[in-house]
Image (tube, rainbow, N blue to C red):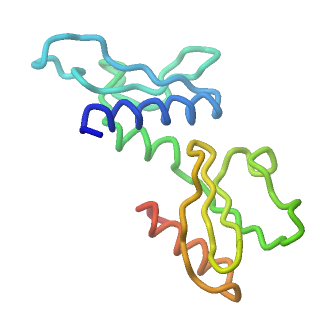
Amino acid sequence: MNIATDDLTREARLRRAAKRQGLTLHKARTRTPEHPAWGTYGLYDGHLNYLVAGNPNTGFGLSLEDVETALHDGDQIHVDRTTDGEGLTFDDTHDQPIAKWVGPWWYLYLPWDEDPITLGGVRNMTDDEVRDMAHQKLGWSK
């Protein structure tokens, strides 16, 4: 894939993640590269259509990285140690990520991505150690 395709894929994932949180992702429609909003995004409440994240003057101003941060700000990593197949679902966690032990590794399940991320580690890690490992893998600050 090239960078443009990667960005489109990422944008589509972020749109789905925003929708699950009751938000909509808007991209500035300006065609002028000199415009301050060119190539940027804004997050809006999906029902009342007010700006949730972005520059209040333009309604945009967020990069894809900024959108990702805004959507995941305060995200928790839920640790699921069940082995009976029941376990946590995204409905249980309000679309928050779930770290689950599926021997011999910990895996991280994200609501905006179909494929889990292999974290590694060992079964007897504490919940905080699992969360730290997941935050590090995702590049999120705690």
Q: Is residue 70 left or right of residue 103?
A: left
The image shows residue 128 at horizontal and vertical percentages of 63, 78
The part of the image, by quadrant, that contains residue 141 is bottom left
Specify the quadrant of the image occupied by residue 5: top left
Question: Which residue is pictured at 31% across the width and 17% down the height?
Answer: 28
- Across and down, in percent, residue 10 comes to 41, 37
Q: Which residue shows up at 55% across the image and 14% down it?
A: 49
Q: Quadrant of residue 35?
A: top left
Image position, residue 97 (x, y; %): 64, 55
Q: Is residue 33 left or right of residue 64?
A: left
In the orientation shown, which residue stands out farthest toward the front? 1
The answer to whether residue 3 is above or below residue 55 is: below
Closer to us: 115 or 95: 115
Q: Is residue 69 left or right of residue 117?
A: left
Q: How many marks?
A: 0
Residue in front for this viewpoint, 63 or 49: 63
Vertical position of residue 54 compared to residue 2: above or below: above
Point out the residue furthest to the left here: 34
- Which residue, as the protein is rendered here, is positioned at the far bottom? 124
Q: Residue at x 45, y 69 (%)?
A: 136
- 78 relative to 30, above or below: below
Image: 98 above or below 128: above
Q: In the figure, is residue 137 to the left or right of 78?
A: left
The quadrant in which the N terminus is found is top left
Q: Nearer the viewer, residue 97 or 4?
A: 4
Measured from the top left, where is residue 95 in percent x and y? Answer: 68, 45
Query: What residue appears at the point 30 percent right and 11 percent down from the top-left corner?
Result: 29
